[in-house]
Image (cartoon, rainbow, N blue to C red):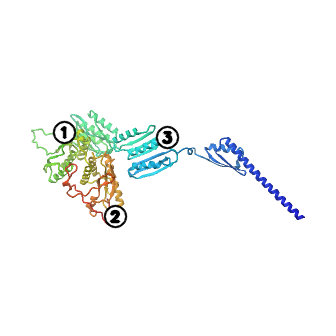
Amino acid sequence: MHRLALIIAAVALALAASASFLLANLTADYVETTTAAKLRERLVAQGYDWVSVRTDGLLVHLAGAAPSEAARFKALAAVKGIVNSARVRDKIKVVDPDSLHPPRFSLEMLRNGDGISLIGLLPGKTARASVLDSIKEVASGARIGDMLEIADYPAPKGWAAALKFGLDSLRMLPRSKISVSPERVTITASTDSQAEKRRIEDALRKARPQGLELRMQINAPRPVISPFSLRVIKDSTGLRFDSCSADTPKAIARIMEAARKAGLTGKADCRIGLGAPSPRWAEAVARAIAALDALGGGDLTFSDADITLVSTADTSQENFDQVVHELETDLPDVFSVHALLPPRPIVEGKTKKTPPPEFVVTLSPEGLARMRGRLRDARTRTAVDNFARAQFGWKNVDDATRIDPALPDGWPKRVMAGLQALARLHNGLLKITPDLVSLRGTADRPQARTEITQILSSSLLGQGRFSIDVKYVPALNHQKARPSPRQCVDRINTILKRKQITFAPSSARIDADSMDVVQKIADTLEGCEDVRMEIGGHTDSQGRESMNLTLSQARAEAVLDALLNLDVLTTNLRAKGYGESQPVADNSTEEGRKANRRIEFRLIGPDGKAIRPAPQPADAAASAQSDKADHAAGDSKPNQAKPATAKPEEKNGTN
């Protein structure tokens, strides 16, 4: 009986506990549900429908994306008005408002000799493929750097027009950086000349879509003037400039002010360029012009930092010495003066005069050069004859000079400089005497007078006077027949056969004495602007093959840059290095290695590949045509040599 009572009591206790547990759970569920419902109701009523509520017992978990920190704080305050803050677990995140809007689309394109690089964010899934297809047409096989991203949003207003304008602009500008956005296109680029700069700027303005903002900065590099020259003459007719160079517009203003004080009337042209020997160029020129005026007349020549000041023959020795001394004292340190007071003329009848020696060359409009006069010895005569034929053509020189051992020092140098200057004319007369080198004639190019001044001023520095009377006849320019593409490349390679462009050892820096070759090539390229040519760089087999390839590429590019600095339009020129892969002579001899270190021009065919000329026989010059620009003595091309079959990985020597 006692045992039955215990069992009944235990069952009753278990039933009571179960009922209490069930009641507690029902109460907790009710509290959770009621609390969550109240919180949601309040949050929605106050505009915080982005908050999600989850209850876990007495704990309340909040989540969602708040549009701002202030909205998050207000939502929490609304919740804490119903439940204790200790029971709230905050998992609300504040979202950047900008991320709720479409991204900002843009495209940046960089184009140079290495290829085209692209970076940006484009709208739509197909935008990237469309842009790359257009870029491949522009690149023409060059490398394309692709760093584009896409976002699946519709293109914003103005994007399509801006993108098309940007791609069209890239086609026009081989060296450029173009940034495209829906409302703006920004262009930074460089061109080969001021004329090309103006043409492209006009074309871009006309092509700009309506409503699109265009910002552009297109630069045309100033030419390098070498030597940096200036020549002023003052005589009974007044003061005039034969040539003028300046480094800034401010320098031109100062030079012209000094010239007007010395007697200049009217206008004078002064070319702005790079290469001034000193930042105080204008100061030195102004002081020298004032000295010329103080002498009462004469001529003044600058060739870089060297100044030649020649007074008139009737200047007193006292005045001459005083003016020259003051000029030497006042000039900036880098400049030096060579002053010359010509001897007074001998009065006829008092002393028997001996006719001075002369060297005279007449150049006919047909290109025939007739040389008369005196040269010092047979060796000089041979050198002058060969030099003249190199300038005017092998069959276009009539040499009737005579030998005179009594000629003054410096005579051969003056003859060579005079012939080089005469070659810049269409026709003319060169006359050389012990006291004067005079040149007169007509030119078919407007820059011929400046080039002649530079040649004579740099070659005859301190070795006597020279005078120039050259007229530019525009009609002659139009009469000139444009050479064929083959003639263009052959004439350049003829120049390079006479004298190669040389570089510092293991360097791409062109030697200073090779700049005259670069200038001749620049002159020859006139009329060949539309001919596609390759500037090929070649080395001998000394050194590593990879190093030679890199060095040859750098040297070819250096020649291209030098031509660009001489105002040559380089749009149709490209540079390519071949290293040691295409020898023309035996690399086992020093003479052969020297022949293999070369720059060579080639035509580019319709397929974009350079056309390698076939080897010519040794007597090719004898059978060549008679065009004066195509011929010179000894112009035969060396026979092609086979590369060495065995080649060690490491080799000593430099190119």
Amino acid type for the residue under numbered disc 2: Lys
- Residue drawn at x 27%, y 54% is 500
**Residue 407 can be seen in this image:** no
Locate residue 51, reporting x and y percent: 65, 46
Q: Nearer the viewer, residue 114 or 353?
A: 114
Numbered badge on residue 313: 1
**Residues at marks 2 and 3, CA–CA distance in whole angstroms:** 62 Å
Q: Nearer the viewer, residue 124 or 334?
A: 124
Amino acid type for the residue under numbered disc 1: Ala
Where disc 3 sits, the SS reads loop
**Residues at marks 1 and 2, CA–CA distance in whole angstroms:** 64 Å
- Residue drawn at x 80%, y 57% is 18
The N terminus appears in which quarter of the rendering?
bottom right
Numbered badge on residue 651: 2
Q: Is residue 215 left or right of residue 551?
A: right
Could you classify mark 3 by the number of other residues whose Cα lies within 10 Å: few (under 14), some (14-19), or many (20 or more)?
few
The residue singled out by tag 3 in the image is: 157
